[in-house]
């Protein structure tokens, strides 16, 4: 869930159409048309990535007249399916996967079960990945993959590049090679398995 207070605004006279903003927007809310950036204010999630990266300082974040609450109602989706999907992705349903917006795995799973097919869809619907964008892309990709979806990164974009291996996927030869160098893969796996399998805390019906 995110309360979106800001929206990107372009100073057209400063924009020279380089498309940097288009390439970094996590929800594909900004497009260059006739060499000028144009923001879809309804899609913008106020993350400021475009403002921070515009080489010509042509974008300013401005306050919205009315904040927009972005969330997927977890209660509207069968929680058994949400839980199955999260655990299949080796995530606990109540685990926070986007620290900037405090979005839990269960909300991303609910978005996917309701039709989100890409990280851009997930971010647009939940607000996750519209803060620092560092930690959340991998769990979002894992949840999509667990649902049988393999999205492609936006064409020509720099938003994300693909899923990285998890600790469960590290090859045996790598584990052996680094075992004597201060890495504790098996212990990490045991601990993370316990986290993934832990009972739900916040639901009265479990
Ligand atoms: S990054 Fe800046 S200069 Fe480049 S297209 Fe976007 S608004 Fe225009
Ligand atoms: S979502 Fe972020 S990157 Fe996209 S237009 Fe809005 S502020 Fe810019």
Image (cartoon, rainbow, N blue to C red):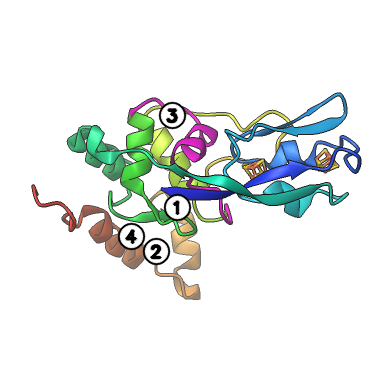
N-terminal label among 1 and 2: 1
CA–CA distance in space, label 4 to label 2: 6 Å
Q: Judge depth for marks 3 and 2 and give the one in front.
A: 3
Helix, strand or loop status at disc 4: helix
On the image, the x and y values in percent for residue 86 come to: 30, 43
> Looking at the image, which residue is at 57% across and 40% down?
162
Q: Which residue is mark 2?
A: 185
Residue at label 1? Answer: 170
**Majority SS type along the magenta span:** loop
- Determine crowd level at label 4: few under 14, some 14-19, many 20+ residues with C-alpha closer than 10 A: some
**Separation of marks 1 and 3 at Cα, in angstroms:** 29 Å
Task: Name the residue beneath numbered marker 4.
Answer: 189
Q: Are marks 4 and 2 in contact (CB under 8 Å)?
A: yes
Question: What residue sits right under mark 3 in the picture?
Answer: 116
Give the mark nearest the N terminus, 1 or 3: 3
In this image, 79 relative to 64: left or right? left
Q: Residue furthest front?
A: 65
Magenta span: 114-133
């Amino acid at each position: 869930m995110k309360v979106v207070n800001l929206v990107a605004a372009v100073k057209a006279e400063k924009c020279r159409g380089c498309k940097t903003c288009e390439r970094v927007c996590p929800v594909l809310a900004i497009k260059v048309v006739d060499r000028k950036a144009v923001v879809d204010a309804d899609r913008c999630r106020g993350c400021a990535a475009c403002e921070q990266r515009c080489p010509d300082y042509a974008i300013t974040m401005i306050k919205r007249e009315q904040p927009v609450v972005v969330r997927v109602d977890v209660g509207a989706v069968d929680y058994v399916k949400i839980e199955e999907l999260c655990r299949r992705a080796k995530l606990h349903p109540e685990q926070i996967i986007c620290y900037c917006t405090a979005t839990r795995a269960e909300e991303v799973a609910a978005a996917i079960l309701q039709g989100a097919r890409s990280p851009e869809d997930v971010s647009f619907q939940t607000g996750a990945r519209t803060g620092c964008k560092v930690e959340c892309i991998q769990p979002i990709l894992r949840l999509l993959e667990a649902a049988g979806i393999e999205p492609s990164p936006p064409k020509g974009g720099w938003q994300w590049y693909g899923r990285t291996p998890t600790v469960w996927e590290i090859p045996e030869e790598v584990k052996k090679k680094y075992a004597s160098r201060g890495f504790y893969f098996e212990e990490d796996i045991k601990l993370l398995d316990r986290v993934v399998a832990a009972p739900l805390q916040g639901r009265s019906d479990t």
